[in-house]
Amino acid sequence: MLPALLAAGAVAGLSAGMVGVGGGFVVVPALLFVAGMLAQEIPNELHLAIGTSLATIIVTSLRSVQAHHKRGAVDFAILRDWAPWLTFGVAVGLLIAAIVDSETLVLVFAIGVLLYAFYFLRPPLAMVREKHYPLPVGFGRAALASGLGGFSALLGIGGGTPFVVTMVVCGRKVHEAVATAAGVGFLIALPGALGFVILGLGTPGLPPGSLGYVNLPAFLIISLVSLGTTPVGVHWAHSLSEQRLRQAFGVYLLIISLTMFNKYLGTQL
């Protein structure tokens, strides 16, 4: 179990630094794998994996923002304007998580991520001709940020994937999008993790060291490892050209989509 957690922490840190996501797509499957190795059956193991994943994203996102900020790539004005709506969305997502499972949402997300992958893997000529739009404001921003926050909280991710796509579609450089997405991850993960702690309080049969639906030993192991690998991911991101970083992000999304499809199929067998 320890190697699985160490590997999850390493990859979560790299992905947070390189492509602006907090590693939830790595941490959640890893935690489900670890849960399957335990002798006893864990109640609501998906909720436990999601809550613990969100807790680790708090650490990876903060470390990623710090590293990207040194390079002047984080747009804090966007984070300030989106913060209230992201938090509102997380609250709605937590209400949904308390009454439904997330298997169908996993399928929807897998399809969405696959479309995003195709967007980033387009040939350079198509990128030259692409049309850019202004970042949404007013009701558009409220709806997009709220939806992003709620959806991310349900899946245990930091929301970096759709946020990076949104910023790139709106004409921002992919390096700036990746850096700012790390901040979005923190804004989603903090209230999300606290919410899953509250949701899981008093649940019998959870593994030792669990505070609600957050397992503290797993959180500490993954977070400590990710602190060391996040700056490496940031260095890789800024050493790549705009085109190469787009391609790297597209490949990453393709892998994530296939992983999520596999996860969904596993719940149907």
Image (spheres, rainbow, N blue to C red):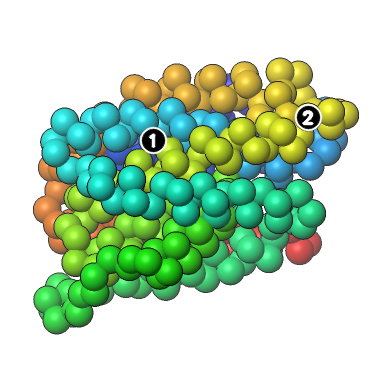
Residue type, numbered disc 2: Leu
Left of 187 or right of it: where is 179?
left
- Residue 201 tag number: 2
Residue at point 43% right, 22% down? 225
Residue 167 in picture, x, y percent from top left: 28, 61
Give the answer, above or below, for where 146 lies relative to 221: below
Would residue 37 be visible to someone looking at this image? no
Nearer to me, 238 or 98: 98
Residue 142 in picture, x, y percent from top left: 44, 62
Residue type, numbered disc 1: Ser
Residue 30 in picture, x, y percent from top left: 59, 38
Instruction: Say how many tags the image has.
Output: 2
Earlier residue among tags 2 and 1: 1
Nearer to me, 20 or 239: 20
The residue identified by callout 1 is 61
Nearer to me, 56 or 87: 87
Left of 137 or right of it: where is 40?
right
Dot 2 falls on a residue whose secondary structure is loop
